């Protein structure tokens, strides 16, 4: 049980850090090339999904990859949402947040299954 919690925490931390780094790099690119602000939201969603995939594949091991991955995906979405809300000084929850949580659970579940199967063959 303790090992499962540590796996979820490590994967969540990795996803948050990866997502933060991607958003910082993307913010720099937007500033340099004067890109439209309309692309920020979709690109941030892609960053979150990639971050969840990376964290799950790297840190979810053992059995029950779907369950651990789904829990991890939800945790990663909530943590990154809170992190970016603190950074931007705006906290607004809408129905889209529920959609992000569901997407995070699906992405986490898939990455958990992949992570368990990749690690299990070693």
Image: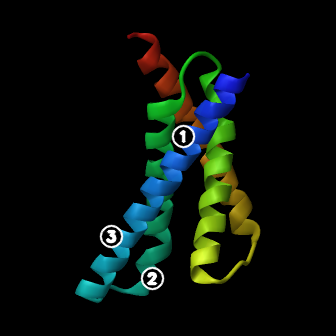
- Residue name at image x 43 percent, y 85 percent: 37
* Residue 16 on image: x %, y %: 52, 55
Q: How crowded is mark 1: few (under 14 residues within 10 Å), some or many (20 or more)?
A: many
Indicate how the structure is coloured in the image.
Answer: rainbow
Closer to us: 61 or 35: 61
Residue 25: numbered disc: 3
Q: Residue at x 64, y 74 (%)?
A: 85
Q: In which quarter of the image is residue 93?
A: bottom right
Q: Residue at x 63, y 40 (%)?
A: 72
Local secondary structure at mark 2: helix
CA distance for labels 2 and 1: 30 Å
Work out whether mark 2 precedes mark 3 in sequence or the reverse, and give the earlier one: 3
Secondary element under disc 1, as helix, strand or loop, is: helix
| Quadrant in the rendering for residue 31 | bottom left
Between 12 and 67, the residue placed more toward the observer is 12
Provide the residue designation for mark 1. Answer: 11
């Amino acid at each position: 049980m303790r090992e499962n919690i540590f796996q979820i925490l490590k994967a969540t931390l990795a996803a948050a850090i990866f997502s933060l780094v991607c958003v910082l790099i993307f913010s720099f690119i937007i500033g340099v090339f004067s890109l439209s602000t309309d692309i920020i939201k979709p690109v941030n969603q892609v960053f979150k999904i990639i971050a969840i995939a990376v964290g799950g594949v790297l840190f979810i091991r053992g059995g029950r990859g779907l369950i651990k991955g789904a829990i991890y995906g939800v945790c990663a979405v909530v943590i990154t949402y809170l992190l970016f809300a603190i950074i931007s000084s705006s906290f607004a929850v809408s129905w889209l947040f529920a959609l992000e949580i569901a997407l995070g659970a699906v992405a986490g579940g898939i990455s958990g299954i992949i992570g368990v199967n990749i690690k299990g063959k070693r």
